[in-house]
Image (cartoon, grey):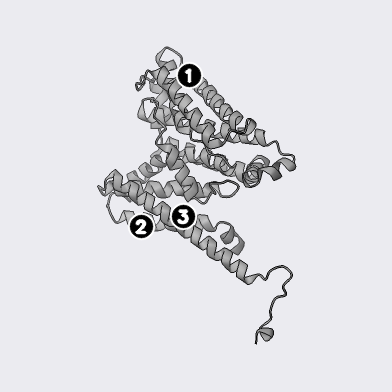
Amino acid sequence: MRRLAKRYATELVLVGLFVVLFWAVSSLSPAFLTTGNMFQLARQMVELSIITCGMAVVIISGGIDLSVGAQVGLISVTMAVLIVSGWAMVPALLAGLVVALIAGAINGLLVGVLGVPPLVATLGTSLVYAGAATAMSEGRAVSGFPEAYYVFGQSFVGPVPAQVFVMLAVVALTLVLMAFTRWGRRVYLIGSNPVAARFAGIRVSRVLAGAYLFAAVLAYVVAVVLSSRTATARVDLGDAYVLSAISAVVFGGISIVGGRGNVLGAFLGVAIFTVIQNGLGLAGISVFIQTVVIGVTLIAVLTARELFGRLAQHSRTTSTPPAGVPATTKEEQA
């Protein structure tokens, strides 16, 4: 039990913080704890949670993907333009998936094979993807989906929005991939020490390409769900999720330099951000103040984590004598 508590210390702290914030914001508005708002709360988490899972895998590998927002826009615009021009829904959905795979393959090629720094590579590709989506849509929002398309973002299973189950499936799949598969362990090793990974015989370029392809596939899922829920496709449809996903990943305890962290922590980060936004919104507090509160919470948690980490390291350093120096007994000190 103690070993589990130590291994998942960050996640347990986040659960505690979630409970405290949940209780705090529930006191601000009587509408917060209603059944309808609980389902709305889960619905608000869907797109950001899915994007965050892809971003978490990429960051654990030692990279970053600034193009996921532009990918969401490009994929949604591609599907919408094809449907409006007369394509059936299924071929248009398949075309959107092909676009996602191409975008992920390009990112994987630049980062994994050519060695372009991930920040530079994905910043450049985000401009390319956004430009392509703007050219296709002529800078306008595209609508006109068939009625069947709205099942992806507006349907319910009983009282529960159907996309909530999609979110839970994606989170569970990501957790299994990262914790119980050889590929997941290789992603962690590459993120912590790419040189050691190469000496271990790991095809680093292939694993990195897989990480960016995984993030692109999840961007495709978000594009379908979000364009279905909003009944429109736009170039900037996914832009708001990029920095939020990175913040949730770091907030959840995943190292920004890679090799350490848990996807569950990132998901808890999304849950905490959503509770703050939902609760403060019901209380009539402006979006700007909500952003300030989220920022302050993020800074406070990261600062506390850094301070506790330094204290723990200092404690280990002072309690362990240098190599070659015998430990001093109490009798010798006396």
If you read the primary sequence from the N terminus, does the residue marked by circle 3 or circle 2 appear first?
2
Q: Nearer the viewer, residue 15 or 299?
A: 299
Q: Nearer the viewer, residue 247 or 99?
A: 247
Q: Nearer the viewer, residue 8 or 103?
A: 103
In percent of width and height, residue 19 lies at 41, 57
Circle number at residue 15: none
55 left or right of 322 in image: left
Tell me if I can see residue 15 in this picture: no
**At x 63% / y 47%, what residue is drawn?**
192
Q: What crowding class fits label 3: few (fewer than 14 Cα within 10 Å), some (14-19), or many (20 or more)?
A: some
Locate residue 43: give its quadrant: top left
Circle number at residue 23: 2
In percent of width and height, residue 168 lies at 49, 41
Circle 1: residue type: Ala
Instruction: Specify the quadrant that holds the C terminus.
Output: bottom right
In this picture, is 328 found above or below 250?
Answer: below
In percent of width and height, residue 88 lies at 46, 15
Q: CA distance from mark 3 to mark 2?
A: 22 Å
Circle 3: residue type: Leu
Q: Nearer the viewer, mark 1 or mark 3?
A: 3
**At x 37% / y 49%, what residue is drawn?**
294
Circle number at residue 302: 3
**At x 36% / y 21%, what residue is drawn?**
139
What secondary structure is marked by label 1? helix
What secondary structure is marked by label 2? helix
Q: CA distance from mark 1 to mark 3?
A: 43 Å
Q: Nearer the viewer, residue 60 or 37?
A: 60
Q: Tag count in the figure?
A: 3
Residue at label 1? 92
